[in-house]
Image (cartoon, rainbow, N blue to C red):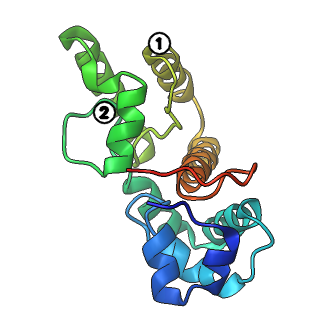
């Protein structure tokens, strides 16, 4: 697949725009739908900022739905291709049984406390770094963690958008 340019996205009708970038936010095409009306975007970074603003301006309930759309880290369940790739890049798909159990316990504790899954941009992070972040963030207040999780969602979205679009240097890499 040829990567998209900001010009491609600026010229896209709503349906094509949502089809192109609707998966940037996990199971939440509403972000792209609401952001489409902000065209034209000056750059891909501008598009990402507009999408982040859409999330920030959404109701707390809509934000919570966005957070809850994310899978637990290390979970061996069905998830989007993007989440599978991101978790695999961090080795979360290959946890030994004891560490898998640790992650499940941390996930359960976190979800019970905050009402949404632990979210972290894990692409190319180490399992140890992720586990430490989980342990540290469990001590946050709900309001602090809610904002931290939203920030992480925006980082994940930016990384996903980067995969879909022409790099800053303008080269057109081909994706399988």
Would you call the spot at circle 1 few (<14 residues within 10 Å), some (14-19), or many (20 or more)? few
Kindly tell me whether residue 23 is visible in this rendering. yes
Comparing 77 with 174, the one in front is 174
For the point 18% across and 12% down, the residue is: 97
Check residue 108 in the rendering and tell me which mark sits there, or answer none.
2
In the figure, is residue 71 to the left or right of 78?
A: right
Q: Is residue 112 visible?
A: no
Q: Residue at x 53, y 57 (%)?
A: 164
Q: Give left or right: position of 59 versus 1.
A: right
What is the spatial separation of the Cα atoms under label 1 and label 2, in whole angstroms?
Answer: 18 Å
The image quarter containing residue 149 is top right
Give the label on residue 128, or none.
Answer: 1
Q: Is residue 46 above or below residue 159?
A: below
**Is residue 28 shown left or right of residue 105?**
right
Q: Secondary structure at mark 2?
A: helix
Neighbor class of circle 2 (other Cα within 10 Å; few <14, some 14-19, many 20+) is some
Q: Position of residue 174 (x, y in %)?
A: 49, 52
- 25 up-or-down from 89: above or below: below
From the viewer's perspective, is 54 left or right of 121?
Answer: right
Task: First in sequence, mark 1 or 2: give its number.
Answer: 2
The image shows a total of numbered marks equal to: 2
Q: Is residue 43 above or below residue 116?
A: below
Percent of width and height locating residue 44 = 71, 62
Q: Position of residue 115 (x, y in %)?
A: 40, 48
- Identify the image quadrant of the N terminus: bottom left
Q: Nearer the viewer, mark 1 or mark 2?
A: 1
Q: Position of residue 29 (x, y in %)?
A: 44, 72
Instruction: Give the farthest residue toward the right.
Output: 42
Tell me the residue at 22%/9% (across/down).
98
Vertical placement of residue 37 versus 121, above or below: below
Instruction: Tell me, yes or no, whether the two marked residues, 1 and 2, touch with CB atoms within 8 Å.
Output: no
Instruction: Tell me which residue sits at (41%, 28%) in the image.
Output: 89
């Amino acid at each position: 697949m040829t990567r998209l340019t900001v010009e491609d996205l600026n010229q896209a009708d709503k349906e094509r725009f949502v089809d192109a970038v609707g998966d940037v936010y996990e199971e939440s095409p509403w972000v792209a739908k609401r952001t489409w009306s902000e065209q034209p975007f000056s750059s891909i970074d501008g598009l990402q900022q507009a999408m982040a603003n859409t999330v920030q301006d959404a109701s707390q309930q809509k934000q919570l739905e966005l957070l809850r759309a994310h899978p637990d880290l290390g979970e061996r369940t069905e998830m989007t291709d993007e989440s599978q790739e991101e978790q695999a890049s961090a080795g979360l798909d290959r946890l030994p049984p004891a560490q898998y159990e640790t992650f499940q316990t941390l996930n359960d504790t976190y979800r019970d406390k905050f009402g949404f899954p632990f979210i972290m941009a894990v692409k190319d992070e180490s399992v140890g770094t992720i586990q430490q972040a989980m342990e540290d963030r469990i001590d946050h207040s709900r309001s602090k963690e809610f904002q931290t999780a939203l920030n992480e969602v925006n980082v994940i979205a930016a990384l996903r958008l980067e995969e879909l679009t022409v790099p800053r240097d303008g080269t057109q890499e081909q994706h399988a």
